[in-house]
Amino acid sequence: NHFIFLMDNTFASMIRQSLNDAHTTLEDTMKGVDNTIAHYKPAGKALPIIVAYAHVAISEDILLNSWALKKKSLLESEWASKTGLSVPHPAMDQDWEKNYTEWTKIVKADMPKLQAYAHAVYENSDAVLAKLTDRDMVDMKVDLSAWGMGEWPMARYVIRFLIGHVDSLCGEISAAKGLQDLKGYPF
C-alpha cells in the first residue's frame, strides 16, 4: 500500500512539471525581447513575437480556466484591462480564423505588462495542476465536441493543448528572433 500511495500523483506531477518546463523554455527564449524586437514583422506569413507570445498566454488562460474548468479566465476577471494589449484577443469561436488573422496584423502590446500577465497565467496553471491527482488527470473530461473531438481526459488535453501549444509558439518566437540576428532558444 505504501508504494501505491507514493505513485498516486506521479503522473499528475510529471504533467505539471512538463508545463512548468515549457514555460521556463519560453521565458528563456523571450530573454532580451523588448518592444522593438517583439513588434518586428517578419516577411511572409510569420508572426511578430508579440502576437505569438500574447496568443500563447491568452490561450492557456482561456483553455484551462474557461474551457476545462468552466470558470472565468484571468483575462475575464482581474487581468481584463492589464495585459498591455492595444486590441483584445479575439474570441475562440466560429469566426476565430478570420478574426485572429486580422488581430495579428494590428495588435501592439507593452511587453512588461504582457509578461506580467503571462507570469500570472503560469502561476494560475501551476496552482490548478498542483491540486490534480493521477485519477483526476484520467477521470476529468474536457468537452471538445464543438471542435468535433468529443471528450478528452484532462491529461491528454493539458499535454496537447497547453504544453504542445507553448512549445510550438516558442519555436515561432525563436525563429522570429533568429530573423533579427538574435539567439532564439536558450540552448
Image: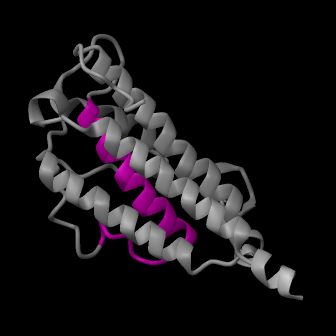
Question: Position of 19 compared to 150: left or right?
Answer: left
**Dominant secondary structure, magenta:** helix
Q: Residue at x 33, y 36 (%)?
A: 29
Quadrant of the rendered image containing residue 123: bottom left
Of 70 and 14, the residue lying toward us: 14
184 relative to 151 in the view: left or right: left
Vertical side of 101 occupied by 137: above or below: below
Please say whether residue 31 is visible from this viewpoint.
yes
- When the figure is inspected, residue 58 is found, relative to residue 143, above or below; the finding is above
On screen, 33 above or below 16?
above
Residue visible at 41% across and 62% down in the picture: 61
Instruction: Give the quadrant of the N terminus.
Output: bottom right
Residue 103 appearing in the image: no
Q: Residue at x 73, y 60 (%)?
A: 152
Q: Quadrant of residue 104?
A: top left
Would residue 175 be found to the left or right of residue 10 on screen? left
- x, y percent for residue 17: 56, 60
Q: Relative to the observer, which residue lies in front, 85 or 96?
A: 85
State the residue at coordinates (19%, 32%): 38
Q: Residue 91 at what x, y percent from top left?
A: 38, 53
Region in magenta: 49-76
Give the image location of residue 53, x and y in percent: 31, 42
39 magenta-colored: no
Q: In terms of image quadrants, where is residue 136? A: bottom right
99 lies left or right of 13: left
